[in-house]
Image (tube, coloured by chain):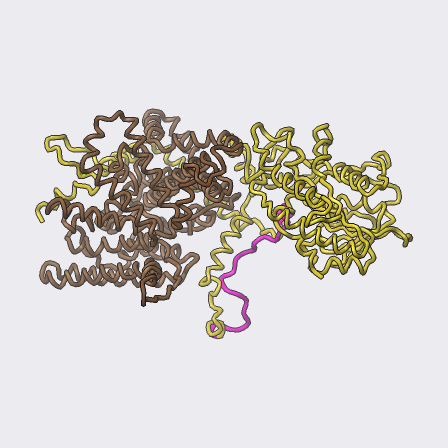
Amino acid sequence: MLFSSLEFLFAYLPIVLLIYFIAPVKLRNLWILLVSLFFYGWGEPVYVFLMIFTVLFDYVCGYFVGKYKDTHHKRAKVILIISVIVNLGLLGFFKYFDFFAENLSKLPFIDIPTLGLTLPIGISFYTFQIMSYVIDVYRGDARVQKNPIVVGAYVSLFPQLIAGPIVRYQDVDDALRERHESAAMFASGIRTFVAGLGKKVVFANAAGALWDAAAADPDRTVIGAWIGLLFYCFQIYFDFSGYSDMAIGLGKMMGFRFLENFNYPYISQNITEFWRRWHISLGTWFREYVYIPLGGNRGGLFKMYRNIFVVWFLTGFWHGADWNFIIWGLYYFVLLVVEKTFLLERMKRWPQVFRHIYTLFFVYFGWLIFVFDDMGAGASYLGTMFGVGSAGFISSSDVYSLLHKLVFIAILVIASLPQPRQLFYKFYEKSKSFRYIAAVGALLVTVLVTAYLVDSSYNPFLYFRF
Amino acid sequence: MENNEIMKNESVTAASPAPAAKPKKRTMQDEADELFALQMRVADGAKGSDRTVMALFLAFIFVLGALIFIIPDKEFSEQENRALQGLPQLQSKFDGNLIERIKAGKFLDKYFSGDFAEDVGDYYSDQFPARDFFVGLKGVTEIAMLKGENNDVVLGKDGYLLSRMDHPDIDNVLKNYDASAAFANRMAEAGIPVTFAAAGRVIDIAEDKLPALYPVDVLHRPWDALNDHAAQTHIAGSADYTDMLYLDLCAPLKAASEAGDDVMYRTDHHWTTHGAYLAYVELMKLWGMEALPESAFTVEVVSDAFYGTAWRNAGMKWIEPDTMEYYRYEGDEDFTMTVHDDGSVFEGFYDRSYLEKTDKYSSFISGNHAYVTIEKNGDENRERLLLVKDSFGHSLAPFLAYHFDLEIIDLRYYKTSTSALALETGCDRVLLINNMDSLTSAATLGLLGME
């Protein structure tokens, strides 16, 4: 189920909240587990069993890891390794089997049939989450959870189940045991949720439709191609950060605090900074559970670069089982290594505007690699951006549509900057009447989103490959 | 593991070459903490407004959520002319007890197949309370953002709503033309002349109502291609020569529109009855026959509240509806119109029951059907015309009926041989009439090749 759907907003959410707050505190985790499984099984119910298996399996692993880690360290380690292998094995099977089958079959004497399985939605997100539970217990960063319902609630927690943020177990350990829902949290949760909903439905969907039109345009011009990709940059940001905001907001309503997942990435002044602001929970996960275990930056330059390489190869591959995602990850590996070795130091002397241009330039072309899993199509799109195979430099359609999108683009640009939120809270703190205006504003955004959902044929879900 | 702490503050991406003495950099975690603290501070300090936002938001989702179930479901949408999704079912119908049901694999089968989820989505968008209000709100918002259009309907001047036609498939136009020419050549053997007439879309005819800088070159492309191709096929001795008559109805109607005539509906994709009359005059001229003068008709205004297809898509509820007219002439009720699809019979050309509905244009010859005939009562010796048409033919038919008995077919629904029909019914003439939207969107006229 999508948050940005009428059935979520007007059936699922009211029922879930109503019973959640009527239920005794003891039963709330169970309720979360049940409704999350229902949420997960929406549209593809079979995979609920996969989810239940994962929960039980890792519950048992976590239990024994916790039991043995102080007394029989080796045993604990073996169980941890088994758990990691099984989790990655499931992810590998469902997400990557066909990719490997297809590519290995290109070698002589090898012929592996592809399976064409539907990717269980959110498997990349929840696999990383459940792994963090067993690993955190092993490392002593979190306590063993004796109650399988709580482990289940953690893994399947519907707000962030299908599109993140990836919540580390240690960050919600306490909240899972005892949390304090409050009116303050709930109201703040509504504001965050509604902001995310608006980003997704009013901004991202409209930008996405414009991108799709550009990508499918047989008469694409140079300008049309550049503008089209610009809309994709807006789509992916508002879609993804919108989902994260909705997740964070829903979490808050129920007393959870998830960490921010996006922090205005497009204002970054270098690629390093961009990746600290973009999909923060994924970066954190790879740092905690891959980079540092591999030795981080200890053990000499070679090892450090090797570790960075591994992280970025995996980051790319995590986004989808296709070559373009791997290339996209390695593209960032190269950029980050270049920055690390000398460019960051040198860039300090550049005027700020150059640093922004530099960053956005590479991020912009990064999305071009990212968006085309058919790399031939990507190459021909790139071609039209530079006049190869394009229908001229600019067309009358470009002029017209650009003219009519100027206000929309301006809104998107402003919404990508931190200032609106800063201003919002500034007024919010200072002016009592503004708080009431903001409350009505939240309602109006919800009404507007409803209008867009009622009259929409375009409401894509971008993360079915993740 | 002592240096685990140090490691934690290092990021994969941000491990700068350690300028040691710098003050500790603010991390994303710090920023997130600050934001959360700020959110909690403003929330705690504003009990009343917190209550307000909760009350408004929750009331909205609870009340509308309940209304969907309280308001009786609609079965059919007049506006969209389609059946609406009813209350979704978890399992398909089955006679038998639970055990038998499980054995038959019908237990919650719709849930497990994912059909239920899909139906629920449709149910919510079809049955949503105050649907029209929300559709209109989106229309207003899109226009307020100066996008100039909503759902591919452009807001034009003078209350015109013009559906965009962005990527005309010119191949289809030429295929349709060639299939028609091949058909015409076969008909010529039987001595039956064929005319190919192409009608303009609203956006072609009312081009001057488009907003400034609208890319009209895209609109001209299929016309240029069609006119060039038609001219080509009429050069004596050319390989694909045909003596099929060709008529571009776009140019004359466009000229009339520019002169101030209301040729096209402002809110619908069809021509007005006046526009159809002009097309009729052009056709008669082409055939060397005399058309009735406009003064021979009595104009009957049958509706001043015609909200056409473009209006229904646009969500721009402030746009005034169209007026719909019938051009009546003496004796126009002395005709028998038979809809062969369902055997229904009418006196005259109009099915006035549609005037009570949204889809008023369907009152002309009772709307879309595969096969309709119109014959003048008590006059057996009239010329017979086979009209192969899209819906633009509907409002044209009453004019043609003055001169001809009509066999009317629509190739979107009529799936048997057109030539056989022409020969069996003894037609003297064939008119193929389609608007450019039909010609570009599918190669429907390929069906003319059916023996």
Question: Residue A145 location, x and y as percent?
Answer: 21, 57
Where residue A193 appears, as percent x and y from the top left, is: 38, 41
The reply to whether residue B208 is in sight is yes
Q: Which residues are magenta?
A: B77-99
Identify the chain drawn in yellow.
B
In the rendered structure, the answer to whether residue B401 lies left or right of residue A70 reads right
Query: Does residue B79 appear to the left or right of B281 in the view shown?
Result: left
Q: Is residue A385 magenta?
A: no
| Residue closer to the observer: B436 or A192 | B436
Q: Colour of chain A?
A: brown
**Prevalent SS, magenta region:** loop
Taking the image as shown, residue A56 lies to the left or right of residue A15, namely left
Front in this rendered view, residue B202 or B340: B202
As rendered, which of B169 and A202 lies closer to the eye? B169
Q: Magenta span has B82?
A: yes
Q: Quadrant of residue B17?
A: top left
- From the top left corner, tell me how far across and down residue B23 is, in percent: 14, 30
Residue ID at (44%, 47%): A460
